[in-house]
């Protein structure tokens, strides 16, 4: 089936996994493995846009990932800075991409927080595509924060208890105003969501691949889109 003939999902979430294993297989350092993963993110982002997929969410760094060794974390912070600089350049050059950084930004350095703010502000008015970079992100934490903010607004009188609904709750999430992910892909053979878009993924189609993330390319994306096109989505009906 030609990928151009498929009706693409409006929102794809990808749990990127396998950078370290790929590095080990090819006698690379962990940093080099993660950097290969960044290149795959850039390629897939462009491939998704070519296929008319308006929203892409990339799970790049979870709250649990912070438990890794300090040297690896330091390398990841350098990589995040580089990819944000690249994204800022794309926006400045006129790419119509809205970039959101989803997660606990306060856990990053002040300089990285400033760069995140700069990228988000520069792309704030863009409407054609949306890229969500989930960094220091955890789905359960997102839900807890939403509950705290709803409680705060209830106590202040901004909303009343009777107004609390799924739609209102959704408006307190990081992804407020966005469609739910139609498809979530995870690479490297693991078959779990690992705290990714916990609320938003209730009716997402799931595809688990043995492919390691740095080896994910347009061909693999097309295979996932073909599989998605065969799914019958009933939403409980």
Image (cartoon, rainbow, N blue to C red):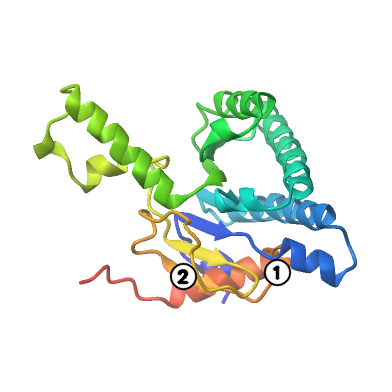
Q: Earlier in the sequence, mark 2 or mark 1?
A: 2
Q: Residue furthest left?
A: 162
Residue at x 76% of width, y 37% of height: 82
Quarter containing the C terminus = bottom left
Rendered residue at 25%/34% (across/down): 150
Q: Residue at x 62, y 52 (%)?
A: 65
Residue under numbered circle 1: 212
Q: Is residue 164 above or below residue 15?
A: above
Q: Nearer the viewer, residue 185 or 60?
A: 60
Using the rendered image of the protein, determine whether residue 227 is visible from the camera's viewpoint.
yes
Disc marking residue 206: 2
Q: Where is residue 49? Give x, y as percent.
A: 59, 50
Could you tell me which secondary element the residue under label 1 belongs to? Answer: loop
**Spot occupied by residue 94 in the image (x, y as percentages of width and height):** 65, 30
Marks counted in the figure total: 2
Visible residue check, residue 177? no
For image coordinates 76% across by 52% down, the residue present is 39
Front position in the image: 91 or 207: 207
Quadrant in which the N terminus is drawn: bottom right
- Vertically, is 95 above or below 6? above
Residue 202 shown left or right of residue 139 in the figure: left
In the image, which disc is placed on residue 128? none
* Image location (x, y in percent) of residue 74: 76, 42
Disc 2 element: strand
């Amino acid at each position: 089936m030609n990928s151009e003939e498929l009706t693409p999902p409006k929102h794809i979430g990808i749990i990127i996994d396998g950078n370290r294993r790929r590095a080990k297989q090819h006698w690379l350092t962990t940093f080099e493995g993660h950097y290969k993963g960044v290149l795959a993110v850039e390629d897939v982002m462009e491939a998704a846009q070519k296929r008319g997929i308006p929203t892409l969410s990339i799970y790049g760094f979870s709250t649990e990932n912070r438990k890794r060794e300090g040297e690896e974390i330091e390398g990841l912070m350098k990589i995040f800075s580089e990819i944000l600089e690249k994204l800022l350049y794309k926006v400045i050059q006129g790419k119509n991409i809205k970039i959101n950084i989803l997660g606990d930004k306060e856990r990053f350095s002040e300089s990285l927080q400033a760069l995140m703010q700069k990228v988000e502000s520069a792309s704030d008015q863009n409407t054609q595509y949306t890229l969500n970079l989930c960094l220091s992100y955890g789905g359960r934490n997102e839900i807890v924060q939403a509950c705290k903010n709803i409680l705060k607004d209830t106590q202040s009188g901004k909303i009343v208890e009777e107004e609390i609904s799924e739609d209102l709750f959704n408006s307190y999430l990081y992804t407020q105003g966005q469609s739910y992910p139609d498809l979530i892909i995870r690479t490297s053979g693991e078959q779990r969501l690992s705290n990714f878009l916990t609320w938003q993924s209730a009716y997402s189609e799931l595809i688990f691949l043995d492919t390691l993330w740095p080896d994910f390319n347009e061909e693999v994306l097309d295979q996932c889109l073909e599989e998605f096109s065969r799914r019958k989505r009933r939403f409980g009906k």
